[in-house]
Image (tube, rainbow, N blue to C red):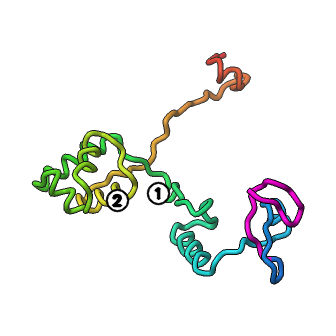
Amino acid sequence: MGDCEICGAMKVGTRTVSMGRANMQACKRCSEKMGLEEKVAPGIKQSRTFSNIAAGGNKMPKRGRKDIMIRGEKELAPDFKRRVSAARTAKGWDKKELAHRMAEKINVIQNVESGKRPTDAVLRKLEKTLDIVLMIDRTSDSHRQISQGDSRGLTLGDFLLGDKD
């Protein structure tokens, strides 16, 4: 937290921006209104641009975090632990062998096969090493069909209270 050198706001989040040849601390509102760019080292700027293009997006992820929506409309298969153990046994490997081939600890494989959700990196390694698909197309949780008749239509109250008049 700092003070904005442009508008004078105190104890706000600031970033270093470039105004002409001077570097100043500016709040988000001032930097957006004045069209000031955040002062970033050239290598970091190039790295952010490259990772953004590789992800297929047109916006940078916030504060350097990975964009969790890169995988699109995919979700982890509900039976992922069965898929992993079945593929492992089909190849004739024990958990130790799979862990060695993935360069992971055996605890990671044990956790996956017991049903604990693995990280995205481990998911990719499992898919590649075992040649299986763990990320499937997302299915909608609920489907509601509203009849088309001479009714007055669905209101928010009908939805919340569950009335079907």
Q: Is residue 91 above or below residue 24?
A: above
Is residue 141 in the magenta section? no
Nearer to me, 39 or 50 = 39
Q: Position of residue 154 (x, y in %)?
A: 69, 26
Crowd around label 2: few <14 · some 14–19 · many ≥20 (10 Å)? some
Tell me residue 92's x, y (percent).
Answer: 10, 54
Observer able to see residue 113: yes
Q: Residue drawn 66% across and 75% down?
A: 40
Give the secondary structure at mark 2: helix
The image position of residue 16, as x and y in percent, is: 74, 70
* Relative side of 39 to 106, left or right: right
Instruction: Please determine whether, in this image, residue 63 is positioned above or below residue 40.
Output: above
The outermost residue toward the bottom is: 21
Tell me the residue at 75%/72% (across/down).
37
Range covered by the magenta-colored residues: 1-18
In three-dimensional space, the C-alpha distance between marks 1 and 2, rounded to whole angstroms, equals 11 Å
Q: Residues within 10 Å of mark 1 (few under 14, many from 20)?
A: few
Does the magenta portion include 13?
yes
Report the quarter where the N terminus lies: bottom right
Q: What's under tag 1, amino acid-wise?
A: Arg
Q: Could you tell me which residue is drawn at 25 percent across and 55 percent down? A: 105
The quadrant in which residue 15 appears is bottom right
Q: Which residue is mark 2?
A: 124
Q: Is residue 164 visible?
A: no
Amino acid under disc 2: Arg
Which residue in the protein does label 1 denote?
71
Q: Closer to the N terminus: mark 1 or mark 2?
A: 1
| Foreground pick, 43 / 25 | 25
The count of marks equals: 2
129 displayed left or right of 96: right
Up-down relation of residue 43 to residue 149 (above or below)? below
Look at discs 1 and 2 and give the one toward the viewer.
2
